Image: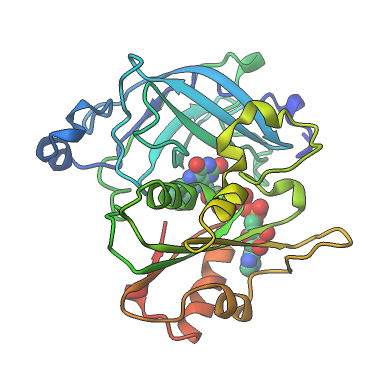
Amino acid sequence: MDLTGIPEMQMVAIGVAVAVVAVTAAYFLSSKKRSKGCLDPENFKEFRLVKRVQLSHNVAKFTFALPNPTSVLGLPIGQHISCRGKDSQGEEVMKPYTPTTLDSDVGRFELVIKAYVSARKNVTPFSGDEGRGLSSCKGTQGEFGRFRYQPGQARAFGMIAGGSGITPMFQVARAILENPKDKTKVHLIYANVTYEDILLKHQKNKITPWHEVGRVLEELDSMAKSYPDRFSVYYVLNQPLEGWKGGVGFVSKEMIKEHCPPPASDIQILRCGPPPMNKAMAAHLEELGYTPEMQFQF
Ligand SMILES: Cc1cc2nc3c(=O)[nH]c(=O)nc-3n(C[C@H](O)[C@H](O)[C@H](O)COP(=O)(O)OP(=O)(O)OC[C@H]3O[C@@H](n4cnc5c(N)ncnc54)[C@H](O)[C@@H]3O)c2cc1C
């Protein structure tokens, strides 16, 4: 199976049932506002897949319908849900995903999911039979509840994301910027292997149907344009083409120094990427003087 051949992989998790958990029962019981949410901290829930759009060679956006057009998912900002499905060999896989939608997006929620081939088993999580395979999903209560964004919890965030690790950052950044009362600044460093891997970036002349993707895809660049004083994004590529103006290689200490807020008690650095990246970033941050309290890894 070839990584570049997503149609061949048929990674479509149509009917992926999603269960959500990442949230404590206390949260549901204590929040009147959220009680309308569709999540159940005790039981797994299934949601109907209504749309799938290919975003890059190995990433697709899945839109799931909520029970009615005014329903909200009710997931606290910065938390994620756990999807359980069958891989192409019929074995169960479970993955954390952060919706790229907020509760202001009623009636639906979206997941941006990267498919990849496991080195060990050469399978793709959430494969479906001709895209119709049904995956069942399960949530794991409490495990994902460590980060819950509250407006004003930091003066500024530095965010260091690798590949599909962008999704939790995107959700938090969107919540901050769409709240006119929230003055928090967000400085994102987003690392990818190639230009084509950059998710949520507006790219013209792509083979993928960007026009269908709507605002989610264009968000990173348009957020930087719309909120120049509050949001910045610095892209880093391992394998850039000639003429690339962003960072090159892995995210370095120098890049962090230049693009993230310096260590201070009222800033936080959020990290989400592949494990080797998370490890490397933790070491960089420590050397730069960021204390553990100033950091959070999704
Ligand atoms: C809370 C949470 C929510 C998540 N939500 C989602 C989701 O919604 N959708 C989804 O698809 N996945 C999600 N994930 C999965 C997770 O984000 C990815 O598994 C992870 O980010 C790997 O990304 P990738 O394969 O795209 O990275 P790659 O594309 O393989 O790598 C990205 C970058 O990492 C850097 N890197 C790699 N190796 C090193 C190294 N040795 N040293 C320094 N830098 C390195 C490079 O700069 C590279 O460009 C989530 C994970 C968590 C924990």
Question: Which quadrant of the rendered structure holds the N terminus?
Answer: top right
Residue 18 lies, in percent from the top left, at: 40, 27
Residue placed at 56% from the left, 80% from the top? 257
Of 204 and 119, nearer the camera is 204
Residue 132, compared with residue 170, is above or below; it is above
Q: How is the image coloured?
A: rainbow
Q: How many marks?
A: 0
Name the side, left or right, on which 131 lies relative to 92: right
In the rendered image, the residue lying farthest to the right is 242
Residue placed at 32% from the left, 23% from the top? 45
Residue 245 lies, in percent from the top left, at: 78, 65
Name the side, left or right, on which 97 lies relative to 249: left
Residue placed at 20% from the left, 42% from the top? 24
Of 156 and 78, nearer the camera is 156
Of 222 and 52, nearer the camera is 222
Name the side, left or right, on which 289 lies relative to 236: left
Residue 212, image quadrant: top right
Question: Which quadrant of the rendered structure holds the C terminus?
Answer: bottom left
Residue 282, compared with residue 188, is above or below; it is below
Name the side, left or right, on which 238 lies relative to 28: right
Residue 29 lies, in percent from the top left, at: 11, 36
Residue 180 lies, in percent from the top left, at: 35, 50
Residue placed at 37% from the left, 49% from the top? 78
Residue 204, compared with residue 241, is above or below; it is above
Residue 125, image quadrant: top right
